[in-house]
């Protein structure tokens, strides 16, 4: 796990080492163990390393292939790299290291773009060929690892984080009205390639881009998720699906043990992280480190779920670390948490992951985490009504969107109001091939879009801000493909995630499986009061915010007068949402 950056020139000038030197300090926390640079003519690469696999200097990056001169910078982990390494050796390739980085280099040399189909893992990488002048930019299937790009006069830059691109300068920092609409309406989900800034884009998950010597780019999709049965699936019983789920998850968890350092678990006490803990115990892991976080209650809402995480920790005799966070500590760390966001993320539990990651990084470098189970296996409350929906667009928007287009138009100044971009995006996505039923359209959208730019991005940003690698077995692409085959009625049976819960009964205590659904609650950011409310007021009413001209003053005064009266359908604070965006912009000097 690392941070990568690069500068490419298309105007016969040399790549900017100054740009690389400006970006690398912004990536230091993603890779605190080492730093490397490479420059040749029109290309310059930079890398910050977190040592997980092949801890020697042979695994250092940028990595140059001695036979071809091709150079690679890579962020992520290829879990099946040992098997691929042996396959490549059988084809005559020799290796200078034991790293997964070198396996990517040799794989592309052997198979070209088809190598992406062979990689099992999370990755974002840039691969440059000095002979042709071409550069390949690629991102994993489910967007677990980020990759941002920005056009510059006569060139292109890339980096693992948006703030790193800003540090190098020359970026159009005006706000993208399409992204603003998504942020305010589509639950702060800004789908790739958009970001909140006009001058920065994201490489789409499951895609790779060829950047030619003259700057021309062509984009290719190498993976998509299709819903519905495969031939023979109709004969499978509920027990068959349960067995398949458990075995596929066992494989996914086992794969994510590949490391030259210990692997722990972020243990919330829910079924997802508890099942991961149980499967690791089955693999013979002893002395496993598990970590939980909890917050002070507010507004009558409990702020921790320690009783469930403690139950699992005791059951498996893990080395458990419980982190209770007081309200004062949340407030003191908000600015650091928001600065760590590559893009503004409104979910209250971002601060939870941020502080938990800080604690975990004191003990361990790699953890497994349960993100993705609700999307893959149908755990959200808005899915069951879609089983019989005749108007999936309206039914989905009603429960998931934070605001209608009409309310958006009343919240921002007129210059930001144009088309109903969020509704149009969902309508287009629902209309594409690969998901026929209304419920499958929503599951596919949430798995390939919402999940990428909300929970997954949240975990990557917060863990990597403390030099911690988070691995997500529920987002193994084979798990996602299995989930897309399971009949929706089975997934949503009962309170949701039925097949997953039935699989879990073979591994973990029933008390955790049958508990009410939970999450990382941070009540203080929903029921804004006292110093939190004053902080929000200051960020929205200062001169910088007024001069920006985003939000109408009368709307802000309404929110500020009674924050608890303005809650989104997904139980988030509308006041926190507008404040978070403005605070993020100010903290990044925008």
Image (cartoon, grey):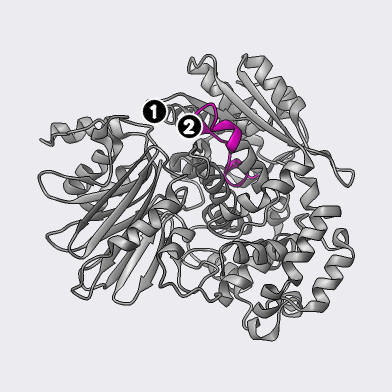
Whether 363 is among the magenta residues is: yes
Label placed on residue 42: none
Look at the image and tell me in which quarter the C terminus lies.
bottom right
Q: Which residues are magenta?
A: 358-378
The answer to which of 134 and 380 lies nearer the viewer is 134
In the displayed structure image, the side of residue 156 where residue 479 appears, left or right? right
Rendered location of residue 89, percent (x, y) = 15, 32
Question: Is 72 placed above or below 296 here?
Answer: below
Question: Is 52 placed above or below 9 here?
Answer: above
Rendered location of residue 508, percent (x, y) = 64, 21
Q: Residues within 10 Å of mark 2 (few under 14, many from 20)?
A: many
Q: Residue 45: tell me if it is visible.
A: yes
The answer to which of 49 and 243 lies nearer the viewer is 49
Q: Label 2 vs label 1: CA separation? A: 8 Å
Rendered location of residue 139, percent (x, y) = 38, 53
Element marked by disc 1: loop
Question: Is 85 placed above or below 390 here?
Answer: above
Q: Residues within 10 Å of mark 1 (few under 14, many from 20)?
A: some
Q: Are marks 2 and 1 in contact (CB under 8 Å)?
A: yes
Q: Would you name the residue on which mark 1 appears?
A: 259
Question: Is 428 placed above or below 34 here?
Answer: below
Element marked by disc 2: strand
Q: Residue at x 62, y 33 (%)?
A: 272
Q: Residue at x 50, y 73 (%)?
A: 173
Look at the image and tell me in which quarter the N terminus lies.
top left
Which of the 4 quarters of the picture holds residue 502?
top right
Q: Residue at x 59, y 67 (%)?
A: 426
In the displayed structure image, the side of residue 323 where residue 89 appears, left or right? left
Rendered location of residue 368, percent (x, y) = 52, 32
Residue farthest along the bottom direction in this orientation? 415
Whether 76 is among the magenta residues is: no
Q: Would you name the residue on which mark 2 appears?
A: 366
């Amino acid at each position: 796990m690392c941070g990568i950056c690069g500068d490419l020139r298309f105007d016969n000038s040399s790549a900017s080492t100054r740009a690389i030197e400006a970006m690398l300090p912004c990536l230091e926390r993603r890779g605190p163990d080492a730093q490397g640079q490479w420059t040749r003519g029109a290309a310059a690469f930079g890398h910050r390393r977190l040592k997980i696999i092949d801890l020697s200097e042979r695994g250092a990056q940028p990595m140059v292939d001695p036979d071809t001169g091709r150079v690679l910078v890579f962020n992520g982990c290829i879990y099946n790299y040992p098997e691929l390494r042996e396959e490549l050796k059988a084809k005559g390739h020799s290796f200078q290291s034991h790293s997964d980085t070198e396996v990517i280099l040799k794989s592309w040399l052997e198979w070209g773009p088809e190598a992406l189909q062979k990689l099992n893992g999370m990755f974002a990488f840039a691969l440059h060929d000095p002979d042709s002048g071409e550069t390949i930019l690629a991102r994993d299937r489910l967007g677990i690892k980020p990759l941002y790009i920005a056009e510059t006069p006569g060139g292109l830059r890339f980096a693992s984080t948006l703030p790193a691109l800003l540090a190098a300068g020359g970026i159009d920092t005006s706000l993208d009205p399409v992204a603003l609409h998504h942020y305010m309406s589509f639950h702060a989900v800004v789908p790739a390639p958009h970001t909140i800034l006009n001058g920065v884009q994201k490489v789409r998950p499951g895609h790779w881009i060829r950047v030619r010597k003259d700057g021309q780019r062509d984009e290719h999709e190498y993976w998509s998720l299709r819903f519905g049965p495969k031939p023979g699936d109709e004969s499978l019983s509920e027990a068959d699906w349960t067995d398949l789920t458990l075995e596929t998850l066992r494989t996914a968890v086992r794969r994510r043990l590949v490391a030259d350092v210990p692997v722990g678990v972020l243990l919330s006490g829910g079924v997802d992280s508890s099942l991961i803990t149980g499967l690791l115990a089955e693999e013979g892991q002893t002395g496993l480190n598990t970590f939980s976080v909890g917050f002070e209650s507010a507004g009558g809402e409990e702020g921790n779920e320690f009783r469930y995480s403690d139950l699992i920790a005791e059951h498996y005799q893990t080395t458990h670390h419980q982190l209770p966070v007081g309200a004062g500590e949340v407030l003191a760390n908000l600015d650091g948490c928001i600065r760590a966001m590559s893009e503004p993320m409104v979910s209250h539990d971002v601060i939870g992951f941020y502080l938990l990651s800080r604690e975990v990084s004191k003990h361990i470098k790699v953890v497994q985490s349960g993100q993705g189970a609700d999307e893959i296996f149908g755990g959200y409350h808005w899915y069951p009504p879609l089983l019989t929906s005749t108007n999936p667009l309206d039914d989905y928007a009603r429960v998931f969107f934070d605001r209608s287009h009409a309310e958006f138009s009343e919240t921002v100044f007129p210059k930001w109001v144009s088309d109903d971009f969020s509704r149009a995006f969902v309508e287009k996505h629902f209309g594409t091939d690969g998901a026929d039923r209304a419920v499958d359209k929503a599951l596919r959208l949430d798995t390939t879009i919402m999940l990428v730019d909300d929970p997954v991005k949240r975990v990557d940003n917060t863990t990597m801000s403390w030099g911690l690698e988070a691995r997500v077995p529920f987002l193994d692409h084979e798990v996602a493909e299995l989930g897309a085959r399971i009949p929706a009625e089975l997934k949503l049976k009962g309170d949701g995630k039925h097949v997953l819960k039935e699989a879990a009964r073979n591994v973990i205590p029933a008390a955790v499986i049958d508990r009410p659904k939970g999450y990382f609650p941070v009540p203080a950011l929903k029921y804004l009061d006292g110093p939190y409310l004053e902080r929000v007021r200051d960020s929205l009413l200062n001169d910088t915010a007024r001069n920006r001209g985003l939000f109408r003053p009368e709307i802000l005064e309404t929110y500020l007068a009674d924050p608890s009266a303005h809650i989104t359908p997904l139980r988030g604070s509308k006041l926190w949402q507008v404040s978070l965006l403005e605070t993020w912009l100010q903290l990044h000097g925008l």
